[in-house]
Amino acid sequence: MRPAIELISEIFVPESVSTHPNVTQICDSLRARVDLDDDDRVIGTQNTQKPELYGWTGDIGWHVDNKGDVYFLILSDSTGVLFAEGETPISYSQGDVIRMNDFTRHRVEQNGLAVGLFMGAFEYGDDTKAINALTEAVSALTEQYKSNYDNAPRWEGSPLQDNECYIWHFDEECNYERTLLERATDTQGMILTCSHDGCTKPASEIDHHFPYMSDQNRCTTHQRGLR
Ligand SMILES: [Zn+2]
């Protein structure tokens, strides 16, 4: 049986990754959370099984996530130690790829903030597939932001950046697409806007009852809670 935590590979992380807007966004948000409780010092994932940005700052206490096998790659130039119940702790640093079965209780001791790429969760993770996908994701973060907008991994569900918006193409499934504002103005779709009195900015948070209601659409200025 595989150990609950295992260092399985190392991927080179070029310097330019740290300046990609998707990466600076999550770093800024983590810096604003330094003094909060454990739960709020973690920026979580949506478990899309594709590479997603996520992160944490400071030590995170014992917990389980109960999803399955997950992979993560440390992008930030910082160090920490991952502990899992009954396993040898792993000291990690930039570029390390770790597979973890998150049904096992685990905690981290972290120096400063950590930003990583996450991929999961899987019933039984395929290491080769994960390493390949994570390698591609790192590479996407070294490319030009706008030309590679759709391929670059992001903090899933993150607040919109100033040059982004959500657009609805009037489809029946009511899916709305996150895209670049400059691209959206050339299409037939409808840009979702803030419903706060007098505000016309693109909505970053969409009403749960959209498209039947949009009263709760909020731009980043009028959004409540953590960003
Ligand atoms: Zn607004």
Image: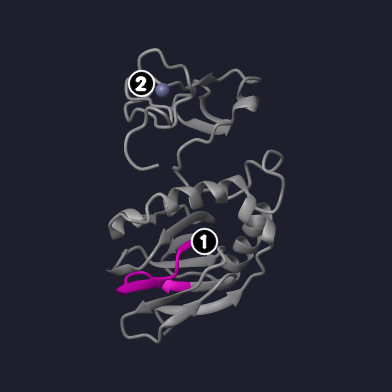
Given residues 110 and 195, the one toward you in this image is 110
At numbered mark 1, what does the secondary structure look like: helix, strand or loop? strand
Q: Residue at x 61, y 24 (%)?
A: 184
Mark 2 or mark 1, which is nearer to you? 1
Residue 97, position in %: x, y?
Answer: 55, 72
Could you tell me the amino acid type at mark 2? Ser
Residue at numbered disc 2: 214
At numbered mark 2, what does the secondary structure look like: helix, strand or loop? loop
Q: Is mark 2 within 8 Å of ligand 1?
A: no
Residue 218, position in %: x, y?
Answer: 38, 27
Q: Is mark 1 within 8 Å of ligand 1?
A: no
Residue at numbered disc 1: 116
Closer to the chain start, of discs 2 and 1, is 1
Image quadrant, ligand 1: top left
Please, is residue 167 above or below residue 68 in the view?
above
Q: How far separated are the C-alphas under marks 2 and 1?
A: 34 Å
Query: Looking at the rendering, which quadrant does residue 138 occupy?
Result: bottom right
Q: Quadrant of the C terminus?
A: top left
Q: Which mark is residue 41?
A: none
Residue 201, position in %: x, y?
Answer: 48, 21
Asked if residue 159 lies left or right of residue 12, the reply is: left
Q: Residue at x 35, y 43 (%)?
A: 226
Count residues near mark 2 (Cα–Cα under 10 Å), then give few for <14, some for 14-19, many for 20+: some
Q: Over which residues does the magenta segment extend?
A: 99-114
Could you tell me the amino acid type at mark 1? Gly
Count residues near mark 1 (Cα–Cα under 10 Å), then give few for <14, some for 14-19, many for 20+: many
